Amino acid sequence: AQSVTQLGSHVSVSEGALVLLRCNYSSSVPPYLFWYVQYPNQGLQLLLKYTSAATLVKGINGFEAEFKKSETSFHLTKPSAHMSDAAEYFCAVSPSGGYNKLIFGAGTRLAVHP
Amino acid sequence: EPEVTQTPSHQVTQMGQEVILRCVPISNHLYFYWYRQILGQKVEFLVSFYNNEISEKSEIFDDQFSVERPDGSNFTLKIRSTKLEDSAMYFCASRSANTEAFFGQGTRLTVV
């Protein structure tokens, strides 16, 4: 069965430090992969997506992610954290490929401190 | 920018009561979804809807749940007889044929 594992339910970084949020997936077909962000009391907003084109994907707000098939990973990074990046981040996979239903990871709450 | 709109933002209901959660998807979208997130847990798929019928549903989506697109613009989720364990944030999402899903801000359902 398809699944998504996000290592670390809570990550804390200093402002200006590298952000690294980990995501590993399992899929029996070439996956579509997504990162969504949820700010407090708001819905899910797409950060970026991988759809079998370039393996390094750039998203909004300076985030990027790299698809590594050999490691079944799709980790999210940002070179320099900003206070406004504090939110919950969800990795998701479309288990049948394409833009179908999503299987979400458990989420990682990112805290950014001064 | 077009967005998915959900109402109400928060609904409190008594156990056993029926509740209807409402969503207005983005106007040219054809695929519609409901997800839920129990507090502290992951976002879970409930149901997908296309061409006026359910295309897929999860094990969670039992006979107590139903979806409808009553008037070509709204997309509703009905829970017939709510249970305490139905308390969750419910997200509606929509998409067109070749785009990712866009999510609404969610309805927080509290069953007391």
Image (tube, coloured by chain):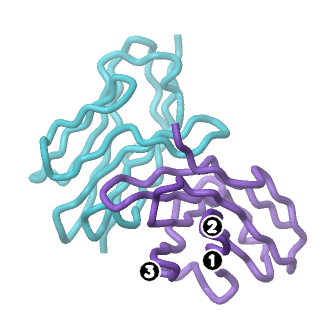
User: What subunit carries mark 2?
Assistant: B
Asked if labels 3 and 2 share a chain, the reply is: yes
Kindly indicate whether the residue at mark 2 contacts the one at mark 3 (C-beta within 8 angstroms).
no
Furthest-left residue in this view = A70
Q: Is label 3 in a helix, a strand or a loop?
A: strand
Residue B72 location, x and y as percent? 60, 68
The residue to which callout 2 is attached is B75
Disc with the residue nearer the chain's start (2 vs 1)? 1
Residue B9: x %, y % from top left = 75, 50
Foreground of the two, A7 or B100: B100
Indicate which disc, 3 or 1, sits on the residue closer to the N terminus: 3
Q: How many marks?
A: 3
Task: Name the N-terminal-most of marks 3 and 2.
Answer: 3
In the rendered structure, find residue B67 and report the number of the disc placed on it. 1
**Which chain did the image draw in purple?**
B
At label 1, the amino acid type is Val
Contact flag, marks 2 and 1 (Cβ < 8 Å): yes
**Residue denoted by label 3:** B55
Q: Amino acid at mark 3?
A: Ser
The hue in which chain A appears in the rendered picture of the protein:
cyan
Q: Work out how far the residue at label 2 is from the one at label 1, CA to CA, in angstroms.
A: 7 Å
Q: Nearer the viewer, residue B9 or B41?
A: B9
Rendered-image quadrant of the N terminus of chain A? bottom left
Q: On the picture, is A77 further left or further right than B73?
A: left
Left-right relation of A14 to A40: left
Between the C-alphas of marks 3 and 1, the distance is 11 Å
Q: Separation of disc 3 and disc 2 at Cα?
A: 14 Å
